[in-house]
Image (cartoon, helix red, strand yellow):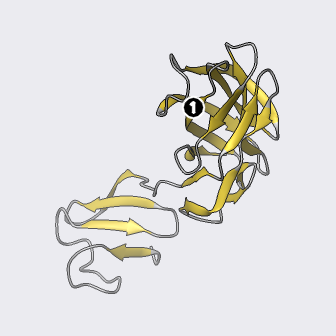
């Protein structure tokens, strides 16, 4: 039990009195497990862990032509990453360092020219579009603040990159613009392995 650490109280080392205080919380740093003392023995409660996540915002305005799919570009400086042991951020998206089950969320804000009314967005894995498809439509030209939000739970292998691909839809010609700094991509680790 040399890996135990007391989370409250004044004890700093393991000895016969470590478990004598009933209700004393103990954390095993070796096995990432939480215990509570019943007065003589530690009782296992669970394994808390911190949430590992990565967040990035869109880079400069992106022009998305009708029916031509592009990879949304992300800022590599406007990011929040809980740990580089889990994620790296590049212009095409977020790469996971460890295999596991991840929650993928994206919110894309756009506006359009008079003849291009909407935006189709998909989560991409290693640059290839995944399903399902999410849509955002404007009812007037240059209407700002139209957005599409999407989320998925995905099993990812170490080294896979998650991003967003998009294309203009709903009009005969024209361009849809993805706003700089107004779109976001987030990955959250749900379960490692």
Q: Examine the rendered structure and indicate whether residue 170 appears above or below residue 6.
A: above
Q: Horizontal and vertical percent for residue 68?
A: 82, 26
Q: Horizontal and vertical percent for residue 110?
A: 57, 34
The residue drawn where x is 57% and y is 31% is 111
Query: Is 162 positioned to the left or the right of 11 in the image?
Result: right
Total count of labels:
1
Q: Examine the rendered structure and indicate whether residue 21 appears above or below residue 161.
A: below
Q: In front: 144, or 52? A: 144
Q: Secondary structure at mark 1?
A: strand
Q: Horizontal and vertical percent for residue 182?
A: 52, 45
Quadrant assignment for the N terminus = bottom left
The residue drawn where x is 63% and y is 27% is 113
Picture quadrant where residue 39 is located: bottom left
Query: Is 29 positioned to the left or the right of 81 in the image?
Result: left
Q: Horizontal and vertical percent for residue 38?
A: 21, 60
Q: In front: 62, or 186? A: 62
Q: List the single residue furthest toward the left.
A: 22
Picture quadrant where residue 121 is located: top right
Q: In front: 76, or 103? A: 76
Query: Is 180 positioned to the left or the right of 49 in the image?
Result: right
The residue under label 1 is 111
Tag 1: Cα neighbours inside 10 Å, few (<14), some, or many (≥20)?
many
Q: In front: 119, or 17? A: 119
The residue drawn where x is 73% and y is 24% is 174
């Amino acid at each position: 039990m040399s890996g135990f650490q007391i989370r409250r109280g004044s004890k700093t080392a393991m000895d016969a009195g470590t478990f004598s205080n009933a209700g004393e919380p103990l954390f095993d740093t070796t096995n990432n497990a939480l215990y509570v003392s019943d007065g003589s023995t530690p009782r296992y409660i669970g394994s808390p862990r911190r949430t590992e996540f990565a967040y990035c915002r869109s880079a400069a305005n992106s022009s998305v032509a009708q029916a031509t799919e592009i990879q949304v570009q992300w800022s590599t400086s406007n990011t929040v990453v809980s740990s580089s042991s889990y994620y790296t951020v590049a212009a095409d998206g977020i790469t996971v360092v460890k295999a596991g089950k991840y929650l993928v969320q994206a919110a894309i804000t756009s506006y359009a020219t008079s003849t291009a009314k909407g935006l189709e967005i998909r989560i991409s894995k290693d640059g290839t579009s995944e399903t399902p498809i999410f849509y955002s439509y404007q009812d007037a030209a240059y209407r700002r603040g139209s957005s599409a939000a999407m989320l998925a739970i995905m099993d990812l292998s170490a080294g896979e990159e998650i991003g967003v691909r998009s294309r203009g839809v709903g009009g005969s010609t024209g361009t849809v613009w993805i706003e700089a700094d107004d779109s976001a991509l987030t990955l959250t680790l749900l379960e490692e392995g």
